[in-house]
Image (cartoon, rainbow, N blue to C red):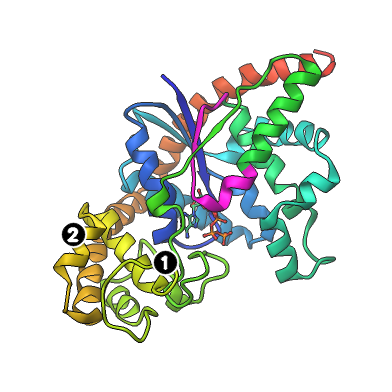
């Protein structure tokens, strides 16, 4: 079976609708057809120096959410990145294969550096894409289900795999992105030109999976639309409405054309109300299951240990070969 790998950062107390539709929902679907590895990437979260107690709590919440949305520990290896130490080791080897200019071209780094100020942005943010390449390459991954914001990092992963293979002999599979066009970028409810993001969206712009139904409805009712009243998809002139149509369609399974027909002449109010209901209906059971899983920390940790064991077995095999290829003594 082809192999998939992906990860999510424990950088917030819940993941959001963009993470869910753009990535995690595909993870669940792919566990039936692929050899699946999914990580809570806590080492990546360290790039923004979280408080230890926050990181600990968020890592468990993220893991619980992954099981709650339907990942099955029997079918997929769900694990915590730092439990497989080989990720950090491979990251160093890949850092040594990366050019400064090449790393400096990463737009996510440029955006974050601009936010923190060029000289105060951490070196960890700069080397983040090489750690991500390590996450992917160590499992000899065929496909990486992600949102479109990760496309450039994936291209770098491919380049690094190719470079390593040509310098040291065939070692890594070249990974491909798995991006679903309709949900590749869910946008901020208050700023439809920006992606919904844990770190940069305002509380009004983002919907968490663990959001209370009352708050969630309010946020959707207040989502930015435009001065018109027609519910039609039009990326350029109606970015907010288009985003809501995409969300509804992805969750309800109805096509955008059907939704346009259904809400013809009804205005935004009725449409938003229904979007809110569709989101509430999807998230309510996930929220309940997450809470149950979090109530038994020992069992959650046990599931993660099982996932790490499976991941480690593959990672060790790759790393033995990598060290030898590089000329490191056994
Ligand atoms: N708005 C989005 N639309 C579609 N997909 C998205 N993803 C993130 N935001 C959207 C995808 O979710 C997966 C996990 O993301 P991450 O935890 O690695 O963080 P990120 O991509 O950096 O997303 P955030 O929410 O903006 O986090 P912070 O603020 O911590 O950087 C990825 O596959 C991502 O593409």
Magenta-drawn stretch contains 186: no
**Label 2 crowding class (10 Å Cα cut-off): few <14, some 14-19, many 20+?**
few
> Would you identify the image quadrant in which residue 326 lies?
top right
Q: Ligand 1 near label 2 (Cβ, under 8 Å)? A: no
* Left or right side of 324 for 218: left
For the residues labelled 2 and 1, the Cα–Cα distance comes to 17 Å
The answer to whether residue 285 is seen in the rendering is: no
Q: Secondary structure at mark 1?
A: loop
Q: Name the residue nearer the viewer: 87 or 6.
A: 6
* Left or right side of 299 for 9: right
**Label 1 crowding class (10 Å Cα cut-off): few <14, some 14-19, many 20+?**
few
The residue labelled by disc 2 is 258
Residue at point 78%, 31% (across, down)? 93
Residue at point 20%, 70% (across, down)? 274
Q: Where does the image place residue 119, in percent across and percent down from the top left? A: 85, 66
Q: Ligand 1 near label 1 (Cβ, under 8 Å)? A: no
Q: Which residues are magenta?
A: 140-153
Residue at point 76%, 27% (across, down)? 163
> Which of the two discs, 2 and 1, labels the residue nearer the N terminus?
1
Residue lying at the far bottom of the rendered structure: 227
Q: Name the residue nearer the viewer: 295 or 117.
A: 117
Q: Where does the image place residue 104, in percent across and percent down from the top left? A: 79, 52
Q: Which mark is residue 179?
A: none
Q: Quadrant location of the N terminus? A: top left
Q: Name the residue nearer the viewer: 308 or 27.
A: 27
Q: Secondary structure at mark 2?
A: helix
Q: Quadrant location of the C terminus? A: top right
Q: How many marks?
A: 2
The answer to whether residue 293 is seen in the rendering is: yes
The residue labelled by disc 1 is 235
Residue at point 28%, 59% (across, down)? 283
């Amino acid at each position: 079976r082809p192999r998939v790998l992906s990860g999510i950062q424990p950088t917030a107390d819940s993941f959001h609708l963009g993470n869910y539709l753009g990535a995690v929902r595909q993870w669940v679907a792919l566990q039936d057809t692929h050899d699946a590895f999914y990580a809570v990437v806590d080492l990546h979260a360290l790039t923004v120096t979280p408080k230890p107690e926050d990181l600990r709590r968020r890592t468990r919440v993220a893991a619980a959410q992954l099981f709650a949305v339907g990942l099955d520990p029997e079918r997929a290896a769900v694990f915590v990145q730092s439990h497989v130490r080989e990720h950090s080791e491979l990251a160093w080897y890949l850092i040594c294969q990366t050019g400064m200019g090449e790393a400096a071209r990463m737009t996510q780094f440029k955006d974050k550096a601009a936010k923190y100020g060029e000289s105060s942005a951490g070196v960890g943010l700069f080397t983040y894409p090489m750690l991500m390449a390590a996450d992917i390459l160590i499992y000899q991954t065929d496909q990486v289900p992600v949102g479109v914001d990760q496309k450039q990092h994936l291209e770098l992963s491919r380049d690094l795999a190719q470079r390593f293979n040509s310098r040291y002999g065939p070692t890594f599979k070249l990974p491909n992105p798995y991006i679903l066009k309709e949900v590749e970028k869910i946008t901020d409810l208050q700023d439809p030109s920006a992606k919904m993001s844990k770190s940069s969206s305002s509380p009004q712009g983002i919907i968490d999976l663990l959001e209370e139904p009352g708050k969630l409805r309010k946020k959707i009712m207040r989502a930015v639309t435009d001065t018109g009243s027609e519910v039609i998809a039009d990326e350029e002139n109606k970015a907010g409405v288009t985003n809501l149509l995409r969300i509804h369609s992805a969750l309800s399974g109805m096509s955008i054309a059907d939704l346009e027909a259904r809400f013809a002449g009804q205005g935004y109010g009725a449409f938003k109300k229904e979007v809110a209901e569709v989101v509430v209906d999807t998230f309510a059971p996930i929220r309940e299951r997450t809470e149950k899983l979090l109530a038994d920390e020992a069992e959650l940790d046990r599931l993660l240990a099982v996932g790490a064991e499976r991941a480690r077995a593959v990672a060790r095999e790759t790393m033995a070969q990598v060290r030898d290829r590089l000329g490191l003594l056994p």
